[in-house]
Structures are given as C-alpha cells and as structure tokens.
Image (spheres, rainbow, N blue to C red):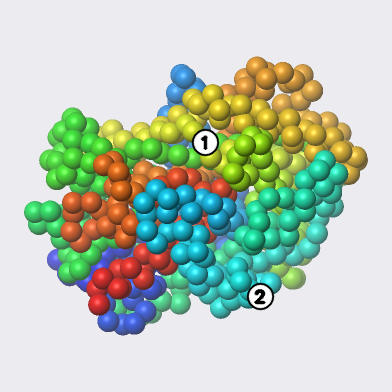
C-alpha cells in the first residue's frame, strides 16, 4: 500500500499540468502548508519532451498523451478529430507547440463584464508579468525573472520573412509583439523556450520546488473520485499502479485536470447533470448542469504548399544528411529546426469588419503532412493554419460510464454554427490573397491543399468538413460566472461545495483570442494568490 494512503495534506492539487504546476509551486513556497500534487501520467524524463521539435513525436505516444478524440457530429464535422492532451508532469505544456500568446485585452474585459470581478485585463496583466521571464526585457506589458521563459526564435527564416512581407503587401500591419498594446498584424512568434530547450510548466515551476519537504508529488496517480463530508470536499481517491489510495485535505482540493479531465472527475464524483450521473449509477452530490457544458475550442483550416526550396522540416525528415546536419547544429548551439516551436510567424486579423478584435489567428508552420502528427510529405512543404478565435459552436464533455479509466465523450460540435463556417471561408480568401503576393509566391510550386479546384464557398466548406483541425485549446467546461449554470465563482470556488476549487482552462468563461497555455498559467498564478489569501 502507498505510504500516502490515509495521509492528510493542507492542499491537494489534482493534475500537474500548466495550472497545477503553478499551484504546487506557489502554495508550497512559504513552507507553511503541506501540498500533495497528483499526476495521472509519468515524470517528464523523455528527452523528446525537452527538445522543442519533439512535440511531433507525442501525438500518438500513449506514454505521455491521453490520446483523446472528439466525437463525430452529423450536423458539422462528421468525423473524429485528434485531441491530444498531456499525461505527464507539465501536462499539455510538455507536449504542445510552445507558442506564447496571452489573448486580446478585450477577452478579459468581457470576462469582467460577465460578472467575474477581478478578471479584467488590468487585473490579470500583473499575473502574466509575474509568470514571465521575457528575453526582450521588462516593460509595461512584460516581466523578467518569472518561472516561464519566453524567447524569440533563434533567427529569421526566409519563408517566415516572406509570409510577413506578403501580409504587409496585402495591407496588414507588421506587429512585433502580439502580447503588447495591440494584437493586430503579422510578425514572428515567441516560444516558451530557454536556450533551445522547452520551458514547460514542470520545468519552470515544478523543478525548482521538487525538493521542498512540504511538497509531495505523486506520478502515475490517476484520480478516480473526490470524497465528501456532506457538502465539503474532504479528500480524494486515486489509483496508483492498481492500488486504491485515499488522501485527505485539511483545507482545500484544487482540481486542475484541464477542460477534459476536470469535468470528468467532477461528474464521476457526483457533481454534474443529475440525470447523466444517475444513468451511470453515480450518487448525486450536487445537480450541476454546467459541469462539462459549453465546451469550446479553436477550429482551424490548413492551407498546404509545395515549395521550390529545401528549407523546411519536411526536408530534414526526408534526408539523412540534412537530419545529421540539423542534429549537429542543435548539439552545437541549440538552434535550428530542433529548437523550433510549432509556428515561426503568425498574424491576427478580422474577417468580420464589425468584430471588436481580430477573429482569426493565422500561423505558418515550416512543415506539411497528410494528417496531424503524421509523416511529412516527400517534398519541401509548409502549412498555414487559420484558427477561428471566437467560435459560436459549443459542445460538451460527458462521462460514458462510472469507470474513471474510460475516456469521456468529447463533443465540440465543430462547425455547427453557420457564422463559424462563414468566417473560416473568409479567412481562406484573405490568406490566399496574402500567399498570392510576389513575396511569398516566389517560393511556391503550388497550393497542395485544398488546391486550385477549391474555389467557391461550398467547395471551401466541404474542405473544412474534410480537413479542418483543432488547435488543441479546449476551454469552458467548468465555467466561471454568476449565472445559474456557472460551475465556479470569481474566486474559482465550486458553487455549493466547500473546500473545492477548479483552476485551469476549463474555468474560462469564453475562449480567448490565441493559444491557451499562457492564460492557463496566469489562472494558476491568480488562483494561488486567492487560495493563500483565504487560508490566511
């Protein structure tokens, strides 16, 4: 039996992902509180986690990935879509593309307008700055000395330069800081990387805290259900290599499993839609129809190009000499393709002119492949994905049984809203205008997908149904708010339950305009402060 069985900790954090690692660090920092951090996955020992381009090896790696898939929907995308989530210390920050984007200031102002006091842009900016170790230095928008490294690319790439120049030629402004005063425009990405190595939440936050005597980290510890004393969360039951272990919480349990696993655990524990829970023989602790509801994710449309120059990741994978040269470059000075995030450059723009802020994020990726995570095409290639930033399509996460090891149903309802299809069709047209500028066209042999025969709106929508992908940004399934279906309040306390909070991307009231890793870490930072304030 585990040595932790029956023990009591001040705080139990469930999930060592982006927010969970922050919580483990901050809650244990002063030495006053005992903290147990549970992670269903393994330690982050694989070298391919820390080599940035290694994320490509983890799309189908069950050792570090939950390998989720979304459910088909006959009214939208009637096919499964790969939805990888990290199952390892660091969570998805250990296997993601490392792009550092916070979202638009109006995203957070909208959260505040929805009744979430303390979550406006001015409220959350200090937490972004606190988390950040910005390579460019400190200013009004950025911080230095924080646990999360934020770095520029190691150099300029000709195709990324051509992409930015073509966007300018098509009438879009250049933007050198998407996380500064204005998000609109095109420019180089920044990555959560330091000296050519990934800076996951585990590296940035957990590694410095691991030796603290008041922090206990349990890996391969799969949470199966929360325990309650009446309406108070009193402990947790988890599986550790086939054994059932129980730990108790003296103060609070903080669920940080992410937008898929957090609602799953709450539902398994009796918090969720009563009819759903009873149908699986689960005793209802609280009828909460909002648990698992309003799942939202960024869907994107890829344009793939066949190029006339061998300067992409495709060429590295398809050539032994180039692979050896790339490996030597990385070993020598931690640069080159092995030290690259998923997108080298990107841009934010409006399709709908009435939108308050950009509704599309386009990113150029220096590779192309027939399927996500698959082998690249046997020719020089690149992909430009255009992600819908504020989709109207909403879905759900629902358990399919009382078995904690069975994946839940993940139904985002991609492309069921007409406006989502319209905006993505408009994004394809705008992106084609950019890629047909001479600055970019000089490197292009052909648009490989969808190709020149995909012209009118119906043909583009058919392409969306066939090839659109997720950007891996699920949120909102344990939504923060003041309405009757909200799951947590503005201090992330689960409504109607004492001693229980949720702190991860699932609490986002709406989807932010960009990648969700930086906001998830911000949520962990802000949650830590609130928890410690309430514990004082």
Pinpoint residue 241: horizontal percent, then vertical percent: 28, 55
Please give the label number shown on residue 282. Answer: none
Residue 398's image quarter?
top left
Residue 305 appears left or right of 228 = right
Residue 181 in the image: x percent, y percent? 64, 61
Res 174 visible = yes
Q: Which residue is drawn at 66% across and 40% down?
A: 350
Neighbor class of circle 1 (other Cα within 10 Å; few <14, some 14-19, many 20+) is many
* Mark 1 element type: loop
x and y percent of residue 497 in the render?
A: 18, 54
Residue 485 sits above or below residue 529 on the image: above
Q: Mark 1 points at which residue?
A: 391
Closer to the camera, 81 or 30?
30
Q: Which mark is residue 137?
A: 2
The alpha-carbon separation of the residues under discs 2 and 1 comes to: 34 Å
Horizontal side, residue 460 vs residue 261: left or right: right
Point out the image quarter for the N terminus. bottom left
């Amino acid at each position: 039996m585990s040595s932790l069985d029956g023990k009591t900790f001040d705080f139990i954090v469930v999930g060592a992902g982006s927010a969970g690692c922050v919580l483990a660090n901050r809650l244990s920092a002063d030495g006053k509180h005992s903290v147990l951090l549970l992670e269903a996955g393994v330690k982050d020992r694989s070298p391919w986690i820390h080599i940035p381009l290694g994320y490509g090896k983890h799309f189908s790696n069950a050792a570090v990935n939950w390998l989720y898939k979304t459910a088909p929907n006959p009214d939208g995308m009637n096919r499964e879509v790969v939805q990888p989530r990290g199952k390892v210390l660091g969570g998805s920050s250990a296997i993601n593309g490392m792009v550092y984007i916070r979202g638009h200031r109006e995203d957070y102002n909208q959260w505040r307008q929805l009744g979430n006091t303390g979550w406006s842009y001015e409220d959350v900016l200090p937490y972004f700055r606190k988390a950040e170790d910005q390579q460019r230095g400190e200013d009004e928008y950025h911080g230095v000395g924080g646990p999360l490294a934020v770095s520029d690319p190691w150099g300029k790439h000709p195709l990324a330069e051509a992409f930015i120049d073509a966007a300018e030629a098509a009438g879009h402004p250049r933007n050198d800081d998407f996380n500064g005063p204005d998000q609109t425009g095109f420019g180089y990405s920044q990555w959560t990387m330091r000296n050519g190595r990934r800076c996951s939440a585990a590296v940035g936050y957990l590694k410095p805290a691991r030796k603290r005597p008041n922090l206990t980290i349990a890996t391969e510890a799969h949470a199966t259900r929360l325990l309650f004393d009446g309406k108070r969360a009193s402990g947790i039951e988890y599986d550790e290599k086939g054994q059932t272990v129980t730990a108790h919480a003296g103060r609070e349990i903080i669920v940080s499993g992410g937008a898929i696993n957090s609602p799953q655990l709450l539902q398994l524990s009796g918090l969720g839609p009563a009819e759903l829970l009873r149908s699986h023989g689960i005793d209802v602790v609280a009828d909460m129809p909002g648990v698992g509801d309003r799942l939202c994710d960024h869907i994107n449309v890829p344009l793939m190009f066949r190029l006339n120059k061998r300067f992409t990741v495709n060429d590295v994978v398809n050539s032994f000499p180039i692979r050896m040269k790339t490996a030597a470059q990385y070993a020598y000075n931690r640069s080159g393709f092995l030290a690259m995030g998923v997108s080298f450059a990107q841009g934010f723009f409006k399709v709908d002119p009435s939108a308050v802020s950009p509704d599309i994020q386009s990113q150029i990726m220096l590779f192309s492949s027939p399927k996500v995570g698959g082998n690249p095409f046997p020719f020089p290639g690149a992909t430009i994905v255009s992600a819908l930033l504020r989709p109207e399509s909403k879905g759900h996460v629902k358990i399919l049984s009382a078995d904690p090891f069975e994946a839940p149903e993940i139904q985002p309802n991609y492309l069921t809203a007409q406006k989502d299809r319209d905006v993505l069709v408009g994004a394809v047209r705008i992106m084609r205008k950019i890629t047909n500028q001479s600055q970019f066209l000089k490197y292009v042999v052909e648009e490989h997908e969808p190709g020149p025969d995909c012209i009118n709106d119906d043909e583009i929508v058919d392409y969306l149904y066939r090839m659109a992908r997720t950007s891996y940004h699920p949120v909102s399934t344990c939504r923060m708010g003041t309405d009757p279906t909200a799951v947590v309040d503005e201090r992330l306390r689960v409504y109607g339950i004492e001693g229980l909070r949720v702190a991860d991307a699932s609490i986002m009231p709406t989807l932010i305009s960009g990648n969700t890793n930086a906001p998830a870490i911000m949520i962990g930072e802000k949650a830590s402060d609130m928890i410690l304030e309430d514990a004082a």
